[in-house]
């Protein structure tokens, strides 16, 4: 990096590349924690996760680019811990079958939502999704893979 150029710094409110932006983008980006807080159950949490990725693709991508994150950012670490806790609670509310490790159930849920969102953002699902609402497609997929306990 050229001398004098600032290194990329990212927090959950602002993306800084080369120099800080003229104004904060706090009002334009709802953190994923807030999006997950609105979820009514595990499936809905996944829908909110996909929605966040679609509405804030740059923030979604940066969240999983460790070299762009401030490792010692207490606010970021707290948001990550609270988000993980919300996911754990949503998984535990789903009452998995006996013998299923709830941690692995959480990994499965996150993998499905994250994978779908990533593929969607990369236009890898354009043919399969077509003109359908991606959130409804995600609900359909989760229903196929994880039928409701009452079904």
Image (cartoon, helix red, strand yellow):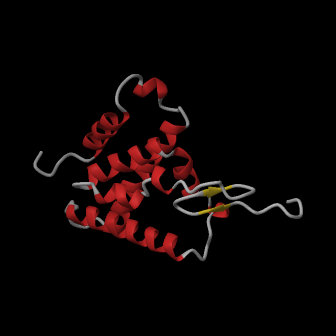
Q: Is residue 97 visible?
A: no
Front in this rendered view, residue 73 or 98: 73
**Where is residue 57 shown, x and y percent of the image?**
52, 45
Where's the C terminus, which quadrant? top left
| 94 relative position to 60: left or right | left
**Image quadrant of residue 110?**
bottom left
Q: How many marks?
A: 0
Q: Is residue 114 above or below residue 10?
A: above
Question: For this view, does 56 lie left or right of residue 39?
Answer: right
**Depicted 123 relative to depicted 91: above or below:** above
Name the residue rendered at 39%, 50% in the picture: 49
Quadrant location, the N terminus: bottom right
Question: In the image as oriented, which residue stretches furthest toward the right?
Answer: 3
> Which residue is nearer to you in this view: 14 or 151?
14
Nearer-the-camera pick, 67 or 137: 67
The residue sitting at the left extreme is: 150
Q: Residue at x 77, y 63 (%)?
A: 6
Name the residue: 51% across, 44% down.
118
For residue 108, side relative to residue 149 (left or right): right
Report x, y in % for residue 47: 33, 46
Is residue 40 among the parts visible in the rendering? yes
Q: Position of residue 105 (x, y in %)?
A: 33, 61
Q: Is residue 23 left or right of residue 97?
A: right
**Residue in the image at 22% along x and 54% along y:** 40
């Amino acid at each position: 990096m050229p001398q004098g150029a600032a290194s990329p710094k990212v927090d959950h409110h602002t993306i800084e590349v080369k120099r800080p932006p003229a104004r904060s983008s706090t009002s334009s980006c709802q953190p994923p924690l807030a999006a997950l807080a609105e979820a009514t159950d595990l499936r809905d949490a996944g829908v909110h996760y996909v929605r966040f990725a679609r509405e804030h693709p740059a923030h979604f991508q940066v969240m999983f680019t460790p070299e762009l994150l401030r490792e010692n950012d207490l606010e970021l670490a707290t948001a990550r811990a609270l988000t993980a806790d919300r996911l754990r609670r949503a998984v535990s509310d789903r009452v998995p079958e006996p013998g299923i490790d709830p941690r692995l159930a959480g990994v499965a849920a996150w993998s499905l939502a994250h994978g779908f969102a990533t593929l969607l953002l990369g236009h890898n699902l354009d043919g399969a999704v077509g003109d359908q609402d991606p959130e409804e497609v995600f609900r359909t997929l989760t229903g196929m893979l994880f039928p409701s306990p009452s079904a």
